[in-house]
Image (cartoon, helix red, strand yellow):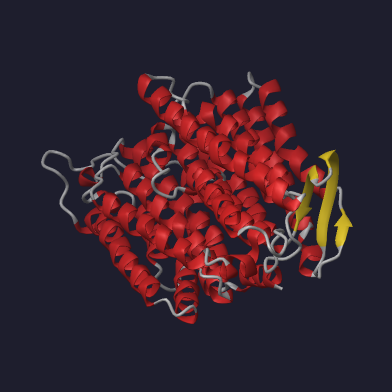
Amino acid sequence: MPVPTESPLLIAALLAPLTGAVLVMLNKRRPNVRESCSFLAAVVLFGLVGAMLKPILAGQTLVYHLFTLLPGVSVTLRADSFSMVFALVASFLWIITVFYSMGYMRGLKEHAQTRFNACFALALFGAIGCAFSDNLFTLYLFYEVVSITTYPLVAHHQDQEGYEGARKYLVYLTATAKGLVLPAMILTYVLCGTLDFSSNMHNGIFPTGTNRILVTITYVCMVLGFAKNGIMPFHGWLPGAMVAPTPVSALLHAVAVVKVGVFATTRVMLYVFGVNTMDAFNLGIPTAYFVSFTILAASLIALSKDNLKARLAYSTVSQLSYVILGVALLTPAGIEGGIVHIANHAFAKITLFFCAGAIYVASHRKNISEMKGLGRAMPWTFAAFAIASLSMIGAPPVGGFITKWYLLVGAINAQQLGIVIVLLTSTILNVAYFAPVVYQAYFGTPPAGDSHEGVKEAAPAMLVPILIAATISIVVGVYPDFFITLIKGALL
C-alpha cells in the first residue's frame, strides 16, 4: 500500500497557473510579455508535475493538507498514479496550446486576449486542483472553479450566440453539480462519516451493511451530476459551447473541462464506491450499458453534422463515455482501457480541434462540404487530422487502438457480448463520420467557383503544435507502456 508523503510540490503545482493568471493580467498592455508569462507558467506546471513522477512510480502517494472544516471534511491535495495520468496530460497540452492560441488569436485579431489568457490559466488551476484532490469535498470545489473560470471563455465573442451558449454551459454544469453532486456528497458524509477517497480502488468508503438503496441513489447522482462527462441527457452544454474560439474548444474537449468530468466521475466510481461495492450492488454493468447509448447516439448525430466543430463536439460526447464504460466493466483490462483513454482522447481530440482552427484561419471554411480539395492546399494540417481520426477510430498504430483493445478485452473478460457489439458498432460509426472528411479534403472536387486559390497552411505557431500533438498520438500508440504502467500502479 502506498505510504502517504507530505510534499510541497502539490501546492506549488496549484500556484503555478494561478501565478500565471496574475502575471498575464499585470501585463495586458504588453502582448509578448503576456504570452511569455502564460508559456512560463505552463512549463513550470509541467515541470512540477513531472517532478512528482519518481516518487509516484516508486509506490508513494504524495499529500498536502491545507485545512480542515469538519472531521472527515478537509481541503487536501493528493497525487497518486491515477491522478498523474490526467495531470501530466493537462499540464503538457497547456504548453502547446499557449503557442497555438497566439497564432489563432492574433491571426484573427481577436479582442480581449488578456482576459482569454488569464481565464485559460485559471481553468488549468481548477483542472490541476481536481487532478490532485484527496477527497470529494476538494474535488467538488475545484470542479466548480473550472465551471466558473471557463464561462468567460465560452462567451468570448460577446454576441448573442456566445452569451446563449455560455448561459447554457453554466446552467447545465452548475445545476447538475449543485442539484445532484452536492446532495449526494452530503448523503455520503452521513453514511460514511468522511469524504476522503479510499486508499485503493478496490475498497470504497461505504461501511459494510450500508443500505443498498441509499448507496445506489448516491451513485446515480454522482455519475449524472458530474455533467462535464457528457453523458446523455446532460450533454447539451457541450455542442452549445462550440460558439467559443477554437483554442477554447480545444480546452473544453481535450485539456480541461470534459477531462475533469470523466476524471471526477471515474475517481468517485473507483475511490468512493470501489470495485467491490460496485460489483456487490450491481452498479457496474448497468452503467456500462447506460453510457453505451451515449456512445452510439452521439455518433449517429455526429454523422448528420456538416459543421466541422459540431461533428467533433458530438464525437467528444461519444468518446468520453468510453472512459466510463471501461471503468464500469470492473475488470482490470476494462479499467486500464478506460483510464488510458483520458490520455489518448486528449492528444487526438486537441489535434482535431487545432486542425479545425487552422482550417478556419487559413481558409475561413467551417463546413465539411466546403473543404473538398482543401487537403491539397493544406497537406500537413489534413495529414494530422487523418492521424488523429485514426486514433478516434481505434486503428493501429495510433493511441486510440490501445483504448479499443483494452476495452474489448475487458468486455470479453466481463462476459459482456453486448458491450463488444457496442464497441464494434461505434468503431464503424467513427469511420463513417471521420473518413469522408479526410477523403474529400484530398480527393474531392472543390465546390463550383471555389478553387481554394491562395489558401495555404496556417502560421507555424499553429501548425507546429498540431504536428506535435499528432506525433504524440502515434508515440502513445506505439509505446503505450508509460501510461499503462501508471494505471497498473493504481490497480494495485
Q: Is residue 307 left or right of residue 316?
A: left
> Image quarter for residue 85?
bottom right
Nearer to the camera, 256 or 369? 256
Taking the spot 72% from the left edge, 34% from the top edge, the residue there is 18
* Location of residue 11 in the rendering, given as x and y in whole percent from the top left corner: 81, 43
Q: What quarter of the picture does the N terminus occupy?
A: bottom right
Residue 359 vertical position relative to residue 109 in the rendered view, above or below = below
Q: Is residue 410 left or right of residue 492?
A: left
Residue 68 vertical position relative to residue 337 in the rendered view, above or below = above
Nearer to the camera, 437 or 420? 420
> Image quarter for residue 321?
bottom left
Residue extending furthest toward the left:
448
Residue 21 vertical position relative to residue 259 in the rendered view, above or below = above
> Image quarter for residue 268?
bottom right
Query: How many labels, in total?
Result: 0
Q: What quarter of the picture does the C terminus occupy?
A: bottom right
* Location of residue 460 in the rendering, given as x and y in whole percent from the top left corner: 48, 44
Residue 108 visible in image: no
Q: Is residue 25 left or right of residue 459?
A: right
* Location of residue 484 in the rendering, given as x and y in whole percent from the top left corner: 62, 71
* Location of residue 386 in the rendering, given as x and y in whole percent from the top left corner: 36, 60
Taking the spot 49% from the left edge, 78% from the top edge, the residue there is 414
